Amino acid sequence: MCLNLKRHPTVWSGYYVQPAFFLYQHRTRSSLLEMAKEYFGTGRIAPKPGNPDVLVYSIHSRRAISAKVVPFLEKCMALSARGADYEKFVAAVRLFEAGLHKDPWGLALTVDIAYAMNMEGKATADRAGGGPRQNPQRPYAERPWPGAKRWSDLRGDAES
């Protein structure tokens, strides 16, 4: 599960935020992903880009995540080692449901939640230092707002 932040020129902020739910398994255990797909009644299974031996079950529909994944996480994952991440993900989905991602404060809160998830990911805002962590090899690179990731535009044959 994650919150994707993507550059998007037609959105008011210039960025599009989308929740997503993922499960990964080696292709020899694809039956586990099939069971998940049957349980949730939605999503797709595809090879992981760059590693075809790993399959990925994914749900990108915000409506399906709200209706199927959130109740599952709330009911079954409270005692998981990643319970805190699941709670953050559910909170972010609730912000989407309320439409708060459409206003600057709500979008900033959603981005903060995204960076607080998944063991304080590699591009997380430094909570103790009060600002974003900076790549020491790129001290000149600025972020659109504190804690925001930066993605480059697609190049060459990756454009579609």
Image: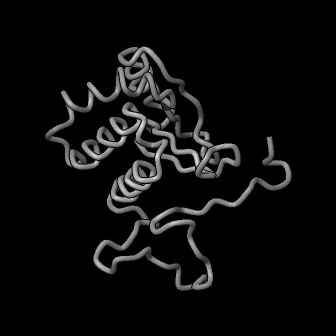
Relative depth, front residue between 28 and 100: 100
Which residue, as the protein is rendered here, is positioned at the far right? Answer: 156
Compared with residue 43, is residue 11 higher up or lower down, i.e. above or below? below
Which residue, as the protein is rendered here, is positioned at the far left? Answer: 79
Q: Give the quadrant of residue 38.
A: top left
**Residue drawn where x is 78% and y is 48% of the image:** 158
Q: Position of residue 104 (x, y in %)?
A: 47, 52
Asked whether residue 25 appears in the rendered view, the answer is no
Q: Is 150 displayed left or right of 115 in the figure?
A: right
**Residue drawn where x is 27% and y is 26% of the image:** 72
Q: Is 127 displayed left or right of 65 in the figure?
A: left
Q: Position of residue 153 (x, y in %)?
A: 74, 56
Compared with residue 39, is residue 102 higher up or lower down, i.e. above or below? below
**Residue drawn where x is 32% and y is 59% of the image:** 119
**Residue drawn where x is 18% and y is 27% of the image:** 75
Asked whether residue 160 appears in the rendered view, the answer is yes
Quadrant, the N terminus: top left
Compared with residue 30, is residue 85 higher up or lower down, i.e. above or below? below
